[in-house]
Amino acid sequence: MPGWLEVDDVELLKLAKNGEADAFGELYERYAQIVFRYVYAHLRERFDAEDLTEEVFLRAWRSLSNYREQGVPFQAFLFKIAHNALIDFYRRSGRSGGHMPIEEQSFPDLLPETGEVALINMEHREIRKTLDQLRDDYRTVLVLRFLSGLSPEETSEVMGRTPGAIRILQHRALSALRNLLEL
Amino acid sequence: MMVSEILQTQDELARVLQLCLEVIESGQETVDSLLSRYPELWDTLRPPLEAAAWLYNRTHLLNPRPGFVDASRQRLVYHLYYERAGPLVIPWFEQQHFFCRHIGGRKIVIQPSLGFTLLILLFIFNFNPALTIKPPIPAGLLTQ
């Protein structure tokens, strides 16, 4: 179907559930970036985050028959899958769950980096190092709200809390983060 | 102060913070200009707003590489079409179980369609005219 941009998510989902791969491709285009940010905020390697982002959408495609539009919004559905995919990734990597503190990681020999890439990688490590010091629910709410750009309502669907509880959690998480920063 | 009042205050504070965040996110105001509108909440709102600004300023560091989304979309759609179509199946061969054997107690299966393709290739190779043309003069006669 030409002109996917004019088709809303609900219609794309209906088409995708009927096996229209191109419609699902359009959903991928719309949500891949925010899922990538969520995943990459938890992982060290960019390539792992890319692989996992694709895996999230592949899992979503295979689970579409279980998805009901009246229930959880599609974004929340995707982020729940992303959360489970991250847990599976940690298990495959030989960890029992939870995140890998940056201090425990040994950095492999990397190919020589250009100045700009090295700076971006360094700043990425700084974000992860800072977020890793926070409680799990604080880190999750901050990543979903500020890095993936979800609204409090969407975040509440992902985390299974009320929007009011998310606003309070966000307030506490931001205050905790501020205490860690040297601004 | 009663617990319910504390909770109410927390909720109100969280609501005000959310409003401030939305204004900052839209780019209408900075943290400083916003705080000047709530002088009584300066101490309470400043730390979370500064932390939020720190995160907003680093969002781009978590973006995928340029071209990644386009390339992986194509890869994904191709994969989905392939997955939906499934492997090539020739029904008659699937029913015959020609290529299914139990060896050492383990079931060894060669996909019938693959076996069929191999048989055709074998047939073409055996009856290739280029290989079956005989030389017009036996080489042995000239060398005797």
Image: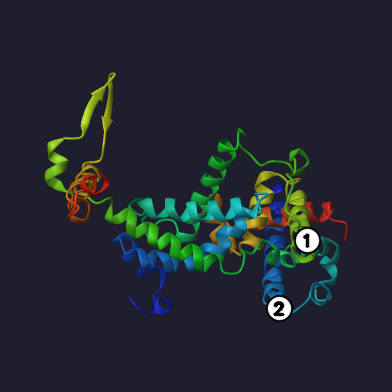
Q: Name the foreground residue: A38 vs A107.
A: A107
Q: In this view, does A43 lie to the left or right of A12?
A: right
Crowding at mark 1 (Cα within 10 Å: few <14, some 14-19, many 20+): many
The image quarter containing residue A90 is top right
Q: In this view, does B97 lie above or below B67?
A: above
Instruction: Tell me, yes or no, if residue A70 can be seen here.
Output: no
Q: In this view, does B109 lie above or below A50?
A: above
User: What's the distance in space between the residues labelled 1 and 2, CA to CA?
Assistant: 16 Å
The answer for which chain carries disc 2 is B
Q: Which residue shows up at 55% across the image and 61% down it?
A: A153
Q: Which residue shows up at 50% across the image and 68% down it?
A: B70
Residue A65's x, y, as percent?
32, 53
Q: In this view, does A32 lie above or below A138?
A: below
The image quarter containing residue B33 is bottom right
Crowding at mark 2 (Cα within 10 Å: few <14, some 14-19, many 20+): few
Residue A152's x, y, as percent?
59, 61
Residue placed under numbered mark 1 in the picture: B51
Instruction: Tell me, yes or no, if residue A102 can be seen here.
Output: yes
Q: Which residue shows up at 63% across the image and 39% down it?
A: A98
Q: Name the foreground residue: A116 vs A163.
A: A116
Residue placed under numbered mark 2 in the picture: B27
Could you say whether the residue bearing mark 1 is in a helix, strand or loop?
A: helix
Amino acid marked by disc 1: Ala
Q: In this view, does A148 lie to the left or right of B124?
A: right
Residue A117's x, y, as percent?
74, 63
Q: Which residue shows up at 21% across the image and 41% down it?
A: B112
Could you say whether the residue bearing mark 2 is in a helix, strand or loop?
A: loop
